[in-house]
Amino acid sequence: MKQFKIWFKSIAVAFSMYSKIPMPRFVWKSEDMKYHLCFFPWIGALIGVLEVVWYQISCSWETSFLSLCVMAAIPLLVTGGFHVDGFLDTCDALHSYQSMEKKREILKDPHIGAFAVLSLLTAVLLGLGFLSVISEPEAILAFAFSFFLSRCLSGLSVVLWKSAHDGMLQTSALTADKKCVAVVLAVQLLIGSVALFVLTGWYGLAALGCLFCSFLYYRWMSHKQFGGITGDLAGYFVTTSELAVVIGLGVLSLL
């Protein structure tokens, strides 16, 4: 019973931290933080389910642009733009071309600069553009899976990679049962990847390729440019990897 309570609280912590879904309120203790990253991908699973449901509702509509805009908005509505905030800060830091220490300071700056706005605008246009050419049900399903798998990879980076500085991400890493979390996330990643390929074929393979290429770039960029990962960089990865999947699926749909 006690273990069940711990796991339930971990789910509540995960959804409270990384989504806008209302959760029961309680005082967070260190044991409540141990396993919350295990359930981080579940938020992505919820987003994926909502994407598929919306596609089923709107696929016959003539107002396809409205459908696309809602599909693009669903992740923002569920997460409250949590990861996009990290994407904006990271884009500002990367385009500053300053020293590693200065880039870390830019990540902490609550203001956004011109490069962040331009990068977000570019991402939105690319996302809507390539999403508009994705029509096959298998491609939509692969798109939906990407939200779950990107969070599996992001969670693994938190518990396995070095943190660049103090912050919420380092707190999550230090309080987590790293071995347990890594195993649970790896199992979810494996099951999700196999299911994706079985259900969607080449579309799934394309999505996986985009996700893992983004993950490798994230590893290289974070350590070279910042000396480790931060919460903002993790948000940058989630955002860019999901965009990469949309682009990859769009290109495959055009072939």
Image (spheres, rainbow, N blue to C red):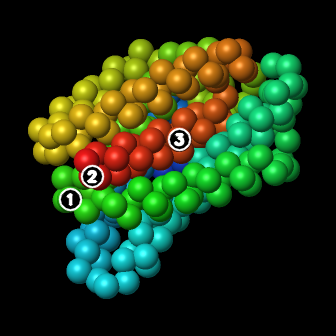
Q: Nearer the viewer, residue 124 or 227?
A: 124
- The image quadrant that residue 237 belongs to is top right
Say which residue label 2 marks: 253
Return the mark for residue 60: none
Residue 173 position, x and y percent, is 58, 23
Q: Amino acid at mark 1?
A: Glu
Q: Which residue is mark 1?
A: 136
In space, the residues marked 2 and 1 are separated at their CA atoms by 8 Å
Q: Amino acid at mark 2?
A: Ser
- Residue 219 located left or right of residue 2: right
Would you place residue 214 above or below residue 80 in this image?
Answer: above
At label 3, which amino acid type do we have? Thr
Q: Secondary structure at mark 1?
A: loop
Give the Cα distance between marks 3 and 2: 20 Å
Are the residues tagged 3 and 2 within 8 Å (C-beta)? Answer: no
Instruction: Pick whichever, 3 or 66, lies toward us.
Output: 66
Give the residue at the far bottom of this rendering.
Answer: 62
Residue at the spot of label 3? 240
Name the front one of labels 2 and 1: 2
Q: Secondary structure at mark 3?
A: helix
Question: Decide: marks 2, 1 in contact (CB < 8 A)?
Answer: yes
In space, the residues marked 1 and 3 are separated at their CA atoms by 23 Å
Residue at 77 percent across and 40 percent down: it is: 92
